[in-house]
Structure formats: C-alpha cells, structure tokens
Amino acid sequence: MRACRGALTYLAFLVVLLAVQRVFAEGFWLSMLTLGLPQPIWLLPALVLLPIALVRRNWLSGTITLVSIMLVVFAFLGPSFGTPSPGEPHLRVMSLNVKRFEEASPADIVEVIKREDPDVVCLQEAIEGREHFRTALFRLLPDYEFAEADEVPILSRFPILSRRRTRLSDLPTWRPANEVLLQVGPKQVRILNVHLQAFPWNDPRPSTIAAAASSRMRQAKQVAELLASAGRTVLCGDFNTIPQTKTYRVIASHADDAFAVAGTGFGFTLPARFPMRRIDYIFTRELEATGAYVGDAIVSDHRAVVADLRVGAESAR
C-alpha cells in the first residue's frame, strides 16, 4: 500500500507541476525555474518507484508509475514525430551557438559546417570581442557571403540582396536580430537570426528570474512582430526556452517549427555532451520543411540544428 501511495503521490505531483507550468509559465518565478531545469529530471522518482514495484510484484504501483513516465515523456519532454517529405530541398539551413569560440577552433567549426553542407549558416554568441576567431572562420569559408551583426552573423551561399539589424528589448540587455534577404533561384527568402535572453543561472533569485523571463518574452513578441510582417522567412536562433513555454508559443503562432514538422525524436540541443533541453530552433514561414535533425558534432555547449526546406512549396502559414 505504501508503494501505491508513493506512485500516486508522484503522479499527483506531475499533474500539479504540469498545470503550474501551463497556467503560469514565465509569469511566476517558481514555474519559470521549473521550466529552466532539464525536464528529464522529472523521471528521477520513477527510477526508484518502478524497481520497487517490480521487486514487490505490486502491479498497480508499477502501472501508475508507467503512466507517470508516459506523462513526463509526452507532456514534459515533447517528442516530435515529424514526417520528412520526399524530393530535393532547395535550401539547407544550419543554426549553431558557438559559445564565444571557447570550446572549438574556427577550423573545427568549419569542419562541422562543411560536413552538414548548409546553404545558410546562422551563428549565435560569435562575440565581437574575438574578432581573430571570426576572421579565421570567415577566411576558411570563401564560398559564403557574410552578414555580420554583433554576435549573430549569417553566412550564405546565395546572393544577399539586403541587410538589416533590429534591436530586441533593452532590459536587462539589448539583443540584436540580424536580417538578410536572399535570392534563392527565382524566389526571395528572408533569414532572421536571434539569440534571446538566457536563464540567469549565475544569479537565480526570484527577482532576476522574473526579469529575465520578462525580457525574453518582450524579445519574443518583437520577433513575432517581425514574422507577422514578413513573407517567405526562415527564423533561426538560440531562443533559451523549451517548447512548453509561452515564449515558444508566441513564436510558433507565427511560424512553423521545422523540427516539429519534419524531425523525429526529442531534438535536445543543450548541453552538447548529454543533451536534455531543446532551446535551439529553425522556424519557417511560407516554406515547407522537408527534413530536420540535430547534429552530433560537439564544438560548443550547444548542438547544431539543421533543416532542409523547399522554397517553391509553401507551408500552411
């Protein structure tokens, strides 16, 4: 009976936690804290409860624990069951946070780019203060044209027709949105590259958590406004938020998540050596995602996201 009580308590905790996350999301610092944690952490009680139920042959307790596991997997982790489309894509896009070039040399990053063979590369945290790394990176990729904007440069094999930089939110710090217009065959495609406010793990007080969440939400709304006024667009970046948040839903209400549409699995990108969070995305508007995946190379604390897109066939948006 005690084992059943423990399993029921675990299930009740998950239901309450899910309700808190969905209702309050970034609006309450405690729910924001739970959303900032790696969501697989909620599986830890099951690692104790399920073996106990099996050893004691308590099938009711085991069943309740299995229900809890399924709840974590599908509600908290959110796997994707996308369907890749047949046919050749017209555009391959890659997004990667390079963590200020601290964990790999430009040559290592170039090797990953060449292996994935993208037409467009969006980098985040390519900090201006390390120009020698950026210069070396650019020198090693002569086939790409570069559009720089602080820490979020865009590299493109296609001709860049225009460039624009937008400031996203100025509290606690402003963030740039880098925008270019590309000529992809007979079509024009806009590329946006962003890096939204991170969770304040170095100072996780309620006030700093609330400030960071508010700043990220303002940035997301600005990005959504940019999307709403756009036509054929690809939005890349490190959004520092998981799919279960309001921040994600603000963006996803104006564009399609390429991995959700055409990828399979959890799509975790952070930390690179043992990914447990999906915070890096490629969104599309008026484009069809024919395939999407997370790369396996480790050249940063993030893994790269890659999406194949078809320019002629448009999505529902």
Image: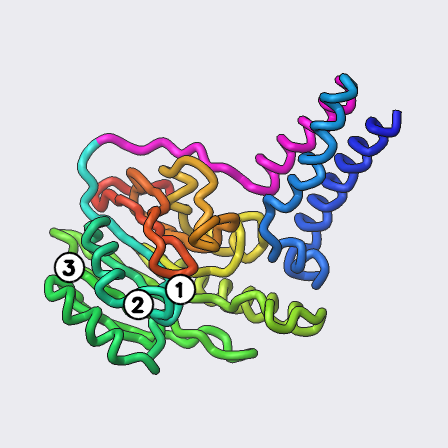
Task: Say what secondary structure mark 3 lies in.
Answer: loop
Q: Under tag 1, what secondary structure?
A: helix
Range of magenta residues:
59-86
Q: Which residue is mark 3?
A: 157
Farthest residue toward the front?
Answer: 55
Residue 257: within the magenta?
Answer: no
**Kind of residue at badge 1:** Leu
Query: In this view, which residue lies farthest toward the right?
Result: 1
Of helix, strand and loop, which mostly describes the magenta segment?
Answer: helix
The reply to whether residue 213 is visible in this rendering is yes
Callout 1–callout 2 Cβ contact below 8 Å: yes
Residue drawn at x 76%, y 43% is 16
**Residue 115, image x, y percentages:** 21, 50
Sequence-first tag of 3 and 2: 3
Q: Is residue 33 above or below residue 73?
A: below
Q: Using the image, determine if residue 121 lies above or below residue 295.
A: below
In the drawing, does residue 21 fall left or right of residue 270? right
Instruction: Tell me the number on the disc at residue 179.
Output: 2
